[in-house]
Amino acid sequence: MCLGIPGQIIAITDADLMMAVAEISGVRREVNVACIAEGAPLENLVGTWTLIHVGFAMSRIDEDEAAKTLDVLRELGEAQEVLDAMAEGAESLRPRR
């Protein structure tokens, strides 16, 4: 089963590679935005809600749909496993000292 989880694009990290940072329930993760770019400047994606699957922003959704989807996933308990795995992977995004 594939699970797309709602996240909000908060920054563009590499326009040439179409990479951005998305925040997913408080966890930040770098994702590829090629599937949702639609030829517009990538900066226009900041603030956009999207369904994210294995590091790719797959489709745009509105904020209300994102909130409802996250609520349902939390109720089902599936989101916690995904968020825990993402948090482990998010270590690479933390500033190095």
Image (cartoon, rainbow, N blue to C red):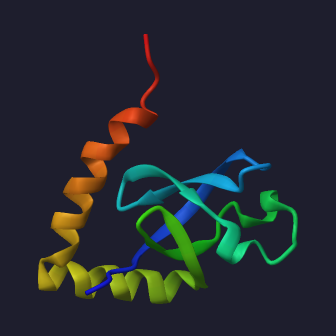
Position of the N terminus by quadrant:
bottom left
Image point (36%, 43%), residue name:
90
Q: Is residue 24 left or right of residue 11?
A: left
The percent position of residue 89, horizontal first and vertical second, equals 32, 45
Q: Is residue 92 left or right of residue 30?
A: left
The percent position of residue 30, horizontal first and vertical second, equals 51, 50
Residue located farthest toward the top when viewing the structure as drawn: 97
Image point (80%, 57%), residue name:
43
Image point (69%, 60%), residue name:
46
Give the vertical position of 11 relative to 49 (above or below): above
The percent position of residue 54, horizontal first and vertical second, equals 41, 66
Image point (36%, 54%), residue name:
26
Give the vertical position of 69 relative to 43 (above or below): below
Position of the C terminus by quadrant:
top left
The percent position of residue 73, horizontal first and vertical second, equals 24, 82
Give the vertical position of 14 relative to 82 (above or below): above
Relative depth, front residue between 78 and 25? 78
Residue located farthest toward the right when viewing the structure as drawn: 40
